Amino acid sequence: MGKLKLGLQLGYWGAQPPPDAAALALEAERLGYDSVWTAEAYGSDALTPLAWWGAATTKVRLGTALCQLSARTPTAMAMAAMTLDHLSQGRFVLGLGVSGPQVVEGWYGQPFPKPLARTREYVSIVRQVLARQAPVTNDGPHYPLPYPGGMGLGKPLKAIVHPLRAEIPIVLGAEGPKNVALAAEIADGWFPIFFSPHHMGEFKDALDEGFARPTARRTAEDFEVIAFCPVVVHDDVEKAADTYRPMLALYIGGMGAREMNFHFDVFVRMGFESEAHKIQDLYLDGHKEDAAAAVPTAMVEKIALIGPRAKIVDDLAAWQESFATSLLVAGNAATLRMMAELLL
């Protein structure tokens, strides 16, 4: 078990840009954090804020957690990765995720089926572009290059820009066992949006399956596990949990459909099946506040550090003993400083 690194998760925006993100990125770098991350859903994109805020930093790695596959073609994603890697002098980390059918089909107007096959093909094309060994072609059914049909004038092309690095680290967001195994096989790291240090077994089985495949790029020893670790410091544990209940209700209840919600499934596997059904039913019936109130404190405690500092110190031990390699912290400057004191 190596020393845990810390990352700052700036996430995606709400109704407006967060006013303190630039200052937090600088503070994270000053404190010795390893990385700063941005995200996207269906509002702000992940790349523009990362470039804007990251321009003021010089040492932290700059990552997307996550860019959504359906938002960009694989070659467009590779162009952005190559560009940001040059501008940041080799500090970029490409985090990718498939999102879910609601966003993919409702927002991007793209088909959702075959997410694992699409991810495999997508990552393969991105790596081809970055390797820049030959004009890029792909025979797969999801992202054929050159495009079959159209005017028939498409031809394989090689990037004009010479990449700063032939390989940029690729981290995959994954929740289901098959997707986690795929991350272990084809990626350099895994980003679990809901990570519980108390449920290592099921994660480990999926990771081990991926590492055992003959095409696996890495082993458990050199693979990053970048775990989202919300931190809420408050003397009252229940009030600390209150600040995070609405987000869990949104993901369990609203980030997906009743028939398919990967976030919901994660908490069912953690043993919260009846609670997850109650939260989902309330949320989808329009009772969002009741759904948040139905999130048990024990559920929050599985995937976050909440309460007084002394309790957080005690609870942190399980995260340190887990196979996470980095904890992504979201919080104010005081929270960042506390986590740096405890881990760095």
Image (tube, grey):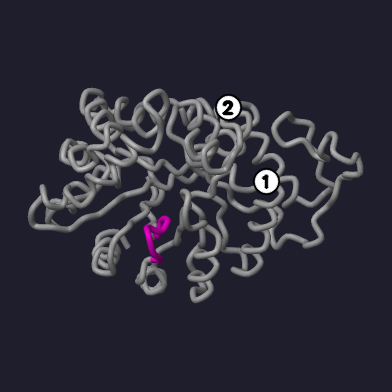
Q: Residue at x 55, y 26 (%)?
A: 212
Question: Which quarter of the figure has residue 250?
Answer: top left
Amino acid type at mark 1: Thr
- Judged from this view, the residue extending furthest toward the left is 236
Above or below, 126 against 294 in this view is below
Q: Is residue 95 left or right of residue 299?
A: right
Above or below, 280 against 76 in this view is above
Q: Report x, y in % for residue 47.
A: 55, 60
Q: In the depicted view, which residue is nearer to us: 124 or 141?
A: 141
Q: Report x, y in % for residue 203.
A: 40, 31
Q: Residues within 10 Å of mark 1 (few under 14, many from 20)?
A: some
Report if residue 11 lies within the magenta region. Answer: yes
Instruction: Report which residue position mark 1 lands on.
Output: 73
**Residue 7: in sight, yes or no?**
no
Q: Give the number of the disc on residue 24.
A: none
Secondary element type, mark 2 = loop
- Point out the stretch of residues depicted in magenta: 10-17
Q: In the depicted view, which residue is nearer to us: 204 or 336?
A: 336
How far apart are the two marked residues, 1 and 2, measured between alpha carbons? 16 Å
**Residue 60: in sight, yes or no?**
yes
Q: In the depicted view, which residue is nearer to us: 188 or 82?
A: 82
Secondary element type, mark 1 = loop
User: Magenta span: helix, strand or loop, mainly?
Assistant: loop
Q: Report x, y in % for residue 333.
A: 28, 69
Instruction: Report which residue position mark 2 lands on.
Output: 113
Q: In the depicted view, which residue is nearer to us: 8 or 138?
A: 138
Amino acid type at mark 2: Pro
